[in-house]
Image (cartoon, rainbow, N blue to C red):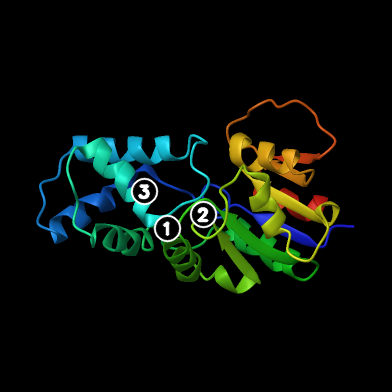
Amino acid sequence: MIKRIIFDIDNTLIDWKAEYWDCLKNVFNELNLPYSSETKAKIQHAVDNYEDGTNFTYTKESMMNAIEEELGYKLPESFFDIWIRYLGMCVPEKADDEVVYTLQYLKQKYDLVVLSNWFKKSQDERLKRLGLDKYFSRTYMTENIPMKPNKEAFEIAKGPYEFSECVMVGDSLKTDVSGAVNANMNVIFYDRNNIKINSNEYIMATIRKFTELTDIL
């Protein structure tokens, strides 16, 4: 019996839009640093590389080092905190109606939590700005715990429940689906790009619309 549902954030609960990367311009302006499209591209590349599986968790220090190595120069110590502040504002005008409806329904039946590969302050702020925070008993961000798809992330996110009593809901095959399957946890793949995946005993379902969760759970 499922007792806890674990949700990813980006492109699952909240759409991540390419334009949100443009908040970097505000950060560099606030610090009186030169900025260009190349600067943004290099930081994006640094973040992507950071998540390639060689890093076990997020820390400001290691992420800063990765960004500075890509840029080829040192950044002010305040850079990361300012960036995190701006990222917390990167949300649409309102929460998706289908997400709100589904969470309202599921909260009546299950313990809902979040597991996200990013920094807690910005992700918690994004949930709060959209009024989604009230649906979750806990938010697990990987600056404090191992990153998905590491099995340890799912061990922590399951809390007091057994793996068989939890289900992960996410859009990423690499971090959400493979991570949950490797941890012997049930998973529902939120397929937003019509991707065919191999069947597995732990993959409960593939959904194309968020509201489909109300039919499955």
Please indicate whether residue 83 sits to the left or right of residue 195 in the image. Answer: left
Say whether marks 1 and 2 touch (CB < 8 Å): yes
Residue 183 seen in the current view: yes
Separation of marks 1 and 3 at Cα, in angstroms:
26 Å
Find disc 3 in the rendering and name its residue.
Answer: 63
| Residue type, mark 2 in image | Ile
* Crowd rating for badge 1 (residues with CA inside 10 Å; few <14, some 14–19, many 20+): some
Find disc 2 in the rendering and name its residue.
Answer: 14
Give the SS element for disc 1. loop
| Residue type, mark 3 in image | Met
Give the SS element for disc 3. helix
Separation of marks 1 and 2 at Cα, in angstroms:
8 Å
Viewer-nearest residue: 180 or 188: 180
**Among numbered discs 3 and 2, the one appearing first in the sequence:** 2
In this picture, is 164 found above or below 94? Answer: above
Q: Picture coordinates of residue 69 (x, y %)?
A: 26, 38
Image quarter of the N terminus: bottom right
Find disc 1 in the rendering and name its residue.
Answer: 92
Nearer the camera: disc 3 or disc 2: 3
| Residue type, mark 1 in image | Pro
